Structures are given as structure tokens and as C-alpha cells.
Image (cartoon, rainbow, N blue to C red):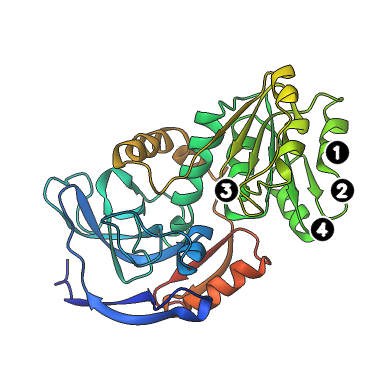
Amino acid sequence: MAKLPTEMTVIEITEPGGPEVLRPARRPLPEPAHGEVLIEVTAAGVNRPDTMQRQGLYPPPPGASDLPGLEVSGHVAANGPGARRHAPGAAVCALTHGGAYAEYCVAPETQTLPAPAGLPLADAAGLPETCFTVWTNAFERARLRAGERLLVHGGSSGIGTTAIQIASALGVRVFATAGSPTKCAACEELGAERAINYRDEDFVAVVKELTGGEGVDVVLDMVGGSYLQRNLAALRPEGRLAQIAVQEASKSQIDLFALMRKRLSIVGSTLRPQSVESKARIAAALEEQVWPLVESGLVRPVIDTRLPLEEAAAAHARMEAGRHIGKILLERNAG
């Protein structure tokens, strides 16, 4: 390995605000602590929590970098004390606590996975955040299994495109919602049996029609607000709602009798505050259950846009405009 530099280019949040507050800066190279690896970044994925952090709505947890960026791909540049799994130079992708919008980033070794064989290394940056989120919420917390039915809201998002592919590959019957004919077509190309345009169709009515009046076993929702009661209506008896975000609102009224009558369950989680140990367990499950699907080509990150690291503001603007399908990546030396 070449000698490491002492400084690197990063993208800082200069103050809470719009995309324009993201600006390149120079900082010292981070040092990997015990159990951590230092990754020379090839690409970083852009996610909704990054835009929330930029607005001052989602502060990093104690001890985490103040730089945005929760997922990364690249080569191991150095190992901290106690980190031995990945040799220097190994191609990896990782879920980070923050700091991925930079030329170098540290991550816990247990949250760092081998880059899947056959996948371009930059594209692997689009896997960790979505795969960790989908697996833990849909398959672990909501107990989704082969032969069941899943409704994915936001089917054309990074989370949505990942959920559709993994669930379809594992024998789940998948439906999705999206906001345009183009986005609906993309969902169906990825494996959704039917994509529902939520702007002019009632997803509850469509799902009931497609399932003989029964409904789905699991709903994966990132909207919240007014969707809550409708999600419960779309579930069959013993169904489970997995709440992973609240883009509309975090509060809503619920008909508890409907919940009781159909014996429904509501689960939810956020990823970033979870312990390293919890994320290590999820990473091990992904490597065993999902990585073979990626290496076989059944699951692939859908890449919408590739921009240079220095154009992080443009990446955030595109995400917030809602026109993207799949992942937005920030790449070093892209252009």
C-alpha cells in the first residue's frame, strides 16, 4: 500500500440549511480506533438521513463524525488495533456512523463486508444502508417469509428497489407504490407484480383486489402520517406493519379495534442509533442470506445518478426533488 496522506478532501455541513450548505473542505485523515478499519473511499451512497442531518434534524450520535454519509465502498487502507478480517487493499463496503462524504472514512470492522464479486466497486456503496434497513425491518422484525405478500411504499427509492428485489428473490409476492408511470414501470421491472401509482389509485383497494380481498402479510412504510390507518386496512389478519421512516408525519390516529380484530402488529426501527453489536449481527445475516443473491445477479443496487464527491449539494438537490429512481452515488474522480 502507498503511504497514506495526512489530509483529505471532505464535504462539510457549514450550517443547517439547504443543499448549498454542503461545501468541500480539507481535514486531517481519521485514524481507525480499536476494531475499526480505514477505507479509501471509491463511492459513498446518498440517503434521506443525510439530508435530514444537513437540515439539523438528525444529529449524529455521540462519538460519530459530524460529516454526512452512512455507507461507503472502497479499499481497506489500514486496520485499527484488533481489526484483522480485511487485509489492506481488500475491496469492501461498509455501514458507517457517518463521515462517508470524504476521501477516507472509518467504519467498524464488523459493519464492513467484502464487496460482492461481480459488482462494480462503486456500485457496492449503494448496498449497506438499504440492505441493513430492509433485512432487519422486513425479514427480522416483521418476519416476512417466502410465500407471503409484501407491499412496499416508495418502491422506486433506494430502500424500495432493494426491498422489491430481495423479497422477490426469496419467493415473496411483491406489490409497490410509486408516484409516476415511469417509476411504477421500474418497480415492475425489478420484480413487483403490480406497482400502484399513489397519485391516482387507492393502494388499499388495488391490493385487496389483487389478493382476493385478503390483503398483504407485511407493509414496509416510510411515509407515516395519513398512511397508518390505510396500511392497517391493507393488511390481512395476522399482518405486520414495518415503519422505517415518517416522511409525511410522525403522529397519526389509529383504530385500535381494527388492530385487535385482525390481530395486527406494528414494528419499527431506526438504524443509526443501534449498537455496533446489533449492526454486526445484521451484517452477518446479510453476508449469509443476501450477498449470494447479489453475486448471482438476482439483486443489484439500482443506480440513478453518479456525481463527483465535490457535487454533494447537487446530489442532495436531486434527492429532495424526488425524481430519482434507486440510489444516488458520490464518487471520487467521477465526471
Q: Is residue 265 above or below residue 242?
A: above
Which residue was labeled with disc 4? 181
Q: CA distance from mark 3 to mark 4?
A: 24 Å
Local SS, label 1: helix
Local SS, label 3: loop
Q: Residue 335, position in %: x, y?
A: 49, 80
Q: Residue 73, position in %: x, y?
A: 38, 59
Which residue was labeled with disc 3? 245
Q: Nearer the viewer, residue 170 or 10?
A: 10
Q: CA distance from mark 2 to mark 3?
A: 22 Å
Q: Nearer the viewer, residue 61 or 117?
A: 61
Between disc 3 and disc 4, whose residue precedes? 4
Image depth: mark 2 or mark 3 in front:
3
Which residue was labeled with disc 1? 206
Q: Is residue 189 above or below residue 328?
A: above
How many residues crowd around disc 4 within 10 Å: few (fewer than 14), some, or many (20 or more)?
few
Q: CA distance from mark 3 to mark 1?
A: 23 Å
Which residue was labeled with disc 2? 201
Q: Amino acid at mark 1?
A: Val
Q: Amino acid at mark 2?
A: Glu
